[in-house]
Image: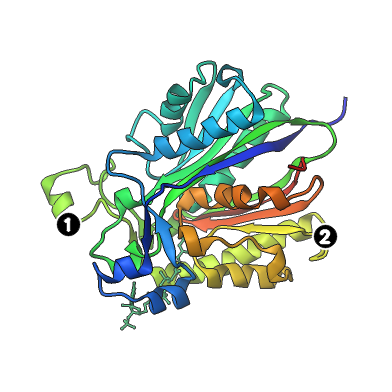
Amino acid sequence: MGKITAAITGVEGYVPEKVMTNHDLEKIIDTSDEWITTRTGIKERHILGDDEATSDIGTRAVKKLLEKKNIDPKEIDLVICGTVTPDYPFPSTANVISDKVGMTNAWSFDVNAACSGFIYSLATGAQFIETGKYKKVIVIGADKMTSILDYEDRATCVIFGDGGGAVLLEPNEEGLGVVDSVLKSDGQGRKYLLQPGGGSLNPPTHETVDKRMHYVHQEGKAVFKFAVTNMADVSAEIMNRNNLTSEDVDWLVPHQANLRIIDATANRMGLPSEKVMVNIQKYGNTTAGTLPLCLWDWESQLKKGDNIVLSAFGGGFTWGAIYLKWAYNS
Ligand code: UT7
């Protein structure tokens, strides 16, 4: 028997119907379409309803995925959800999604790695396939960022949106699927990008709410500097480790935080723009949702054997890259 690798055998995504454009934001805060477009590349983002949560994003994506693959939810062994906007502090959102979808034979847990949530979750899920212990693992990246956005802070509220997606991992013996991963973290970065309130350090009180501590706080310029260097470095590192030239790489799937960070990463890898997935203009930064949303949007163009590099940087700091070979033609 050949070595077992973990192949993505299907992908689905979900974004809410409601769209908030840059012009809509101009009406509620002091910003402009011109500023947002030139600084980030974002034109619009999708917004989930007040009565819905991150599990609803994940549930819709997973239901579509299982229907498309004609798989009974009871066949799923494990569900991993990357998110920083869980429905509750506990139980995990993966637990809730498993219940809503009927994946009653699966065990499940969340991964908290901010914008690297999908990369971390995918690398984790792949290990469970590679050991041979599990045959069907669902990996989700989803966030309802609007639940932690301060619409009085123009530096953060314009960049995020709601959405996410899910992939199915199955064993492969042709060498397709996840080949390598480079994962990193540095807790020193927490001072630049965090949600200060609501955890055990600053449990919810009237005071923490009055101080707006339950919203995302970001020092954009500082985060930008770390992101632009580290996302490019880690992407170059995974190419070097696997002897990949820029000709060998068919697609870069970059975290969608800022078009300038994506361009810097692609330049460092020597990739032309045709090989770079960019959908930031229509979704904004959906945190753990960005990478599965890219795979979903590009699925029809991906071919069996394509060399794909996924790359992300986010709060923590957390960052990393995954090199995988696409396993199917759709
Ligand atoms: O996904 C997880 C990781 N996160 C990231 O990778 C994000 C990294 N950071 C960024 O993408 C960028 O830093 C931002 C898009 C967040 C901000 O862009 P920037 O070019 O770094 O702008 P800045 O924060 O340095 O602000 C420049 C100016 C400031 O005005 P002054 O002080 O120069 O007068 C801001 O007050 O732009 C102002 N500004 C805005 N103006 C209009 C900040 N936000 C806005 C806004 N509309 N929404």
Classify mark 2: helix, strand or loop. loop
The N terminus sits in image quarter: top right
Residue at the left extreme, as displayed: 206
Residue topped by disc 1: 211
* Residue 281: image location, x then y, percent: 50, 65
Marks 1 and 2: which is nearer the front? 2
Question: How many numbered marks does the figure carry?
Answer: 2
Which residue is at a point 14% across and 44% down the rendered structure image? 205
Nearer to the camera, 72 or 271? 72
| Marks 1 and 2, how far apart at CA | 50 Å
Which numbered dot is residue 257?
none
Q: Amino acid at mark 2?
A: Asp
Which numbered dot is residue 248?
2
Question: In this rendering, would 166 be left or right of 134?
Answer: left
Residue at the front extreme, as displayed: 17
Question: In this rendering, would 305 be left or right of 197?
Answer: right
- Tell me where residue 246 sits by quadrant: bottom right
Residue at the right extreme, as displayed: 1
